[in-house]
Each structure stands twice: as C-alpha cells, then as structure tokens.
Amino acid sequence: MIKRVLSGIRATGRLHLGNYLGAVKGMLELQNDPGYETLFMVADIHTITTPFNIDELRKNRREVITDYLAAGLNPEKSIIFLQSEVSEHIELAFYFSSVTTIARMQHLPTYKDKVKQHPGHNTMALLNYPVLMAADILIYKASLVPVGIDQEPHLEVTREIARKMNQQYGTDFPEPVRFATKGEYIPSLKGEGKMSKSVEGSYINMTDDLDTIKIKLSKVPTDSGKEGGPIPKIGGVRSLYELYKLFAPEKFDEDFTKPYESGLIRYQSLKNHLAEITYKELKPIQEKRKKLETDIAFVDNVIKEGAEKARTIASKTVNEVRQKMGLL
Ligand code: TYM
C-alpha cells in the first residue's frame, strides 16, 4: 500500500531558514519519491492558539502557500491546502480529545513554553494544539511526517491517540513517525536556543537578500577565534558551524573545523562566505516567488483544488470514526 505523508507550517509569517531546512526540505524529498502520496497544509487554525492579528493571519495563510510553491512543492505531485478549509480536522480533533487527558497535555514542553511566552493566554485551544495536530495527521492516515525535532513530543501524542482509538474503537490508524532532515534543529543566530520566528534576531528569512543575510550573520556572537580545541557545543560559534555544515558539507572540515581547532579561524570572511552560500540556495526560490506573486489565479486554484482533494479523504475517515464511535 502506498504510504501517506502529511506536514504543515503555521501561518505566523513568512518562512525562515529553520522551517526550510527542518521541514520544507523533507517535504520536497518525499514529494519527489513516487513511493509516497504527499499532503502539505498551512496550519492556519493552529495559528489562533496564540495571540494573533486578523489581517495578518488572512494574509499569511496565502503567503505560506506561495512560499511552499516557490520552494518547489508541486500541486501536480502533492495536495497543497489550507487546514481551515477542511473543517473535518476540527471534528476529528474533538473526537480525539475524548481519549486524551488534560494532565498529558499540560505536561508537554511545547505547551509550557507557550504559556510562559503568553501568560495571559492559557486557553483551551492552546491545550488542544497537539490533539488538533494528531487529527491533521491521522485524518489522512499518514504514517510519515516531515518536521523538525521540536515536533517530536507532538508525534508521540499522535501515536498515543492512534493506539487508544484503535484499541477502544477498532479504527485502523497508523502510528506515524517523523521524517528527519539533516537540518532537523537549526540553532538561533543569537547562539541560544533554536532559530524561531518569535525571537527577534534569531532567524534568517527565506526572502532575505544577500546584504540582509550578511548583516544578520555579522551579528552572531563569536569568540576570539584563537582559542583552538574542539568546536563549542553551544553558542554562536556552534550556530555558524551547524549552518556551514549544512550549506557546504564537502568543505566545512577544511574551512571551519580545522581552522577553529588550530586557533586560526577568521570569522569575518567565514561569515561572508556563509552568507553567500546561503543566499545561493535561496535566490532561485526568491525569483520563483516573485513570479508567483503576480499569478493570483494559479495560487487561488491550488488552494481550491487542494481543499477539494483533501476533503474527499478527510470526510471518509471522519465517517469511519463516527460509525465506530456510535455516532452514525
Ligand atoms: P511551526 O510553524 O512552528 O514550524 C514549522 C516547521 O518548521 C520546523 N522548524 C524548525 N526545524 C529546524 N530548526 C528550527 N529552528 C525550526 N523551527 C521550526 C518545525 O519543526 C516544523 O516542522 N505544529 C507544527 C505545525 C503543524 C503540523 C501539523 C506539522 C500543525 N499540524 C501536522 C506536521 C503535521 C508547527 O509547530 O509548526
């Protein structure tokens, strides 16, 4: 049987390098493998689980679709859609919430982080975030999910829900696993934590031009470069190292590891080079995006057809679940 793949990104703004390397690259790899049927959505409903601006949300859900298409997601190979256009996700999430305890949700690190970030906004929607994510995946019976490592706790919840539903109601949900890319954890440019939209100064946007990337990288904190020894495990040097390794895998030993170890590293020229190789990968995506921005009808059509195709699969699963749970 053909395996299904599902992934999504929230509509919180334009995509950054962490989203691209941790998620989109994995989506592309699986889309181009004929062994998989791929579905990629914009998780616009998940966006309302933290404070948001209505006009921005309306704009961003389309922006992320356009970013997907610019990066190479192809509507002829993948079903590309907006989560909110397939309301069956919400229905299934409610059924799933009946096999999920509040305590389990409260203990998730992702939930605790968000409550810390937005203390006045500890809502039911936020608590339910992973249940909706489980519904996103299981409604298509997807068994492979290309996401960054930060999403692993949510996949664990998804597997637990699948197991419980199968035991209690005899459904046939798979237990999905993460499809990891080499960039599964892109560290922050500030040298602490991960690259994240919610931390100013931590990220490079996929739309940044060469000068912007140069300026951002020039601000990454480093050491004197003369210390030598092994590459530090944390901090700005580590962030540069991880990015260098991803963008120049064949040269990073010679350009980075060896000069660092012998205390001869020159950060300025290294940062400039890193900016150039990063931009080289982003440039064709940015050019394609410019063309897509003027092709409104094409993007509209992708959104419309994606929703129709997704709905066909989703409604079948929801009907099965209603039947098994005695609601039909
Ligand atoms: P979001 O919008 O927070 O993140 C989108 C994707 O980008 C990855 N990512 C990173 N990967 C590596 N390094 C980083 N610094 C980095 N920052 C972000 C995330 O791991 C994610 O893959 N819950 C999801 C959205 C979602 C979803 C789903 C995903 C909703 N339903 C169903 C898969 C399947 C999220 O947090 O997106």
Image (tube, helix red, strand yellow):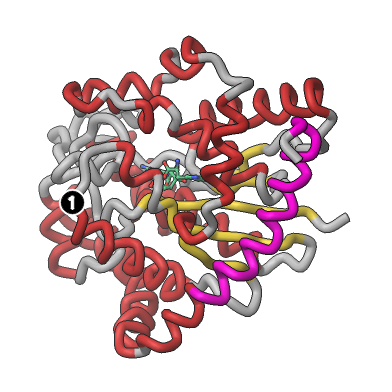
Residue 210 position in % (x across, y down)? 20, 70
User: Magenta stretch: residue 308 in it?
Assistant: yes
**Closer to us: 270 or 36:** 36
Question: Which residue is rendered at x = 84% and y = 29% of the image?
Answer: 170
Q: Quadrant of the N terminus?
A: bottom right
Image quadrant of ligand 1 equals top left
Magenta stretch, overall SS? helix
Q: Is residue 127 above or below residue 190?
A: above
Q: Is residue 29 above or below residue 223?
A: below
Q: Residue furthest top?
A: 103
User: Magenta stretch: residue 75 in it?
Assistant: no
Answer with the quarter of the image where residue 38 lies. Answer: bottom right
Q: Name the residue type under label 1.
A: Asn
**Residue 1 shown left or right of residue 115 in the figure:** right
Question: Which residue is rendered at x = 74% and y = 54% of the image?
Answer: 316
Residue 89 position in % (x across, y down)? 56, 47
Q: Is residue 135 above or below residue 210?
A: above
Answer with the quarter of the image where residue 121 lies. Answer: top left
Question: Which residue is rendered at x = 35% and y = 62% of the image?
Answer: 61
Residue 117 position in % (x across, y down)? 21, 27
Q: Which residue has dot 1 on it?
A: 53
Q: Secondary structure at mark 1?
A: loop
Answer with the quarter of the image where residue 66 lies. Answer: bottom left
Q: Is residue 38 above or below residue 160?
A: below
Q: For mark 1, does the 10 Å Cα neighbourhood hold few (<14), some (14 to 19), or many (20 or more) residues?
A: few
Residue 300 visible here: yes
Tell me which segment is drawn in magenta: 304-326
Residue 123 position in % (x across, y down)? 31, 26
